[in-house]
Image: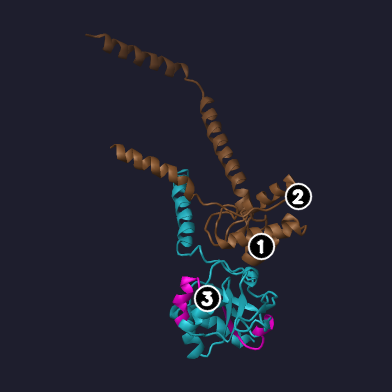
Chain colours: A cyan, B brown
């Protein structure tokens, strides 16, 4: 009977091993957004193209959109821009841009060089909306439903694999439900 | 060899210039308020960095978070309100001290469980060792046999 206790260390080691193994594949740099299921935080910011136009959360009303947080200074934003162009032009996805802690001049230089996939761009030079959205590293891409509710947040570059596996299903789900 | 020492001395002399520092300075009315601020920023975790508090981190997001903590303190917010406002934006990840609830109870209770468990093991081991002392002493027959064996062994060793 007491022999059973001899296996206790083995069982503990196995238990800890399984627990640690489960954590191995996870990327600790990706945090889930706390805003999921909540409306986009209130804001009133200028449009990048036109300083006289002010934008509010109403830009998300009526259609499922992607909200892409970008800046000229962000190297990964250069990497994903080509794919955003493809999504907007070829797939007809509505993308709203959030120009984060950038300057108008450099932002325009970026768009002139790489093209503009955004239906509208929110200009957030101080990063206030970014802060309220919990943005901690551009690029980030949010799926926002037709009622302006955050459905999903992806941190990092958007590419074919991310779109097919993650964002596209979320967009389709949001479209079905709204 | 002397030039190597020279290079080393130069490196040491210049190293003071490259230390990174959290630069901004905030004004507080009282010393207590400043300590409260330091306490708060040392318990909040930078979401961009993997394991650094916002007091130590130079990431832009940490600066934004320090600004927000300062701004809310000036607005008269309590510690809970400030931490809550940041958790509402960035999630519980930013708290080095998570709240005690059903999901975190094991985390919080584990030191106590480990201590009590270890204590029980020690008590068990000692108790069993005590139990062994209580075994009946040798019977007179056994004692006589043992003495006989010892005596005969003694004979053997004494034999040349």
In the figure, A6 relative to B123: above or below?
A: below
Q: Is residue A115 visible?
A: yes
Disc 1/disc 2 C-alpha distance (Å): 24 Å
Q: Residue at x 55, y 38 (%)?
A: B121
Q: Is residue B33 magenta?
A: no
Task: Specify whether B7 is left or right of A161.
Answer: left
**Closer to the camera, A150 or B32?**
B32
In the rendered view of the protein, which quadrant contains the N terminus of chain B?
top left
Disc 3/disc 2 C-alpha distance (Å): 40 Å
Q: Residue at x 51, y 28 (%)?
A: B132
Q: Residue B143: percent from the left, percent from the top?
A: 43, 16
**Closer to the camera, B149 or A149?**
A149
- Callout 2 crowding tier (Cα within 10 Å): few <14, some 14–19, many ≥20: few
Pointer 3: what residue?
A: A106
The magenta span reads: A56-82
Q: Is residue A73 magenta?
A: yes
Mark toward the start of the polypeptide (1 vs 2): 2
Quick one: SS at disc 2? loop
Q: Is residue A147 visible?
A: no
Pointer 1: what residue?
A: B86
Pointer 2: what residue?
A: B29
């Amino acid at each position: 009977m007491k022999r059973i206790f001899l296996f206790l260390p083995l069982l503990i080691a196995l238990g800890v091993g399984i627990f640690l193994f489960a954590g191995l594949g996870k990327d600790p740099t990706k945090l889930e957004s706390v805003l999921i299921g909540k409306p986009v935080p209130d804001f009133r910011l200028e449009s990048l193209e036109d300083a006289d136009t002010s934008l509010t959360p109403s830009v998300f009303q009526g259609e499922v959109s992607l909200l892409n947080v970008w800046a000229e200074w962000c190297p990964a934003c250069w990497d994903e821009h080509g794919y955003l162009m493809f999504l907007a032009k070829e797939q007809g996805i509505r993308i709203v841009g959030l120009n984060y802690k950038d300057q108008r001049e450099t932002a325009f230089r970026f768009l002139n060089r790489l093209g503009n996939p955004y239906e509208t761009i929110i200009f957030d030079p101080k990063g206030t909306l970014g802060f309220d959205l919990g943005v901690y590293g551009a690029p980030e891409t949010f799926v926002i439903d037709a009622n302006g509710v955050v459905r999903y947040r992806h941190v990092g570059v958007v590419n074919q694999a991310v779109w097919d596996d993650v964002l596209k299903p979320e967009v389709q789900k949001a479209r079905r439900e709204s | 060899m002397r030039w190597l020492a020279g290079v080393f001395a130069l490196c040491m002399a210049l190293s003071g210039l490259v230390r990174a520092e959290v630069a901004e300075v905030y004004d507080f009315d009282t010393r207590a308020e400043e300590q409260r601020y330091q306490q708060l920023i040392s318990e909040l975790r930078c979401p961009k960095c993997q394991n650094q508090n916002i007091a130590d981190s130079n990431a832009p997001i940490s600066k934004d978070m320090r600004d927000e903590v300062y701004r809310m303190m000036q607005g008269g917010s309590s510690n809970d309100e400030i931490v809550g406002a940041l958790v509402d934006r960035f999630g519980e990840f930013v708290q080095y001290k998570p709240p005690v609830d059903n999901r975190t109870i094991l985390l919080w209770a584990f030191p106590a469980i480990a201590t009590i468990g270890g204590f029980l093991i020690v008590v068990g081991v000692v108790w069993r060792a005590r139990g062994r002392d209580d075994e009946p002493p040798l019977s007179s027959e056994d004692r006589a046999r043992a003495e006989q064996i010892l005596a005969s062994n003694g004979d053997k060793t004494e034999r040349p």
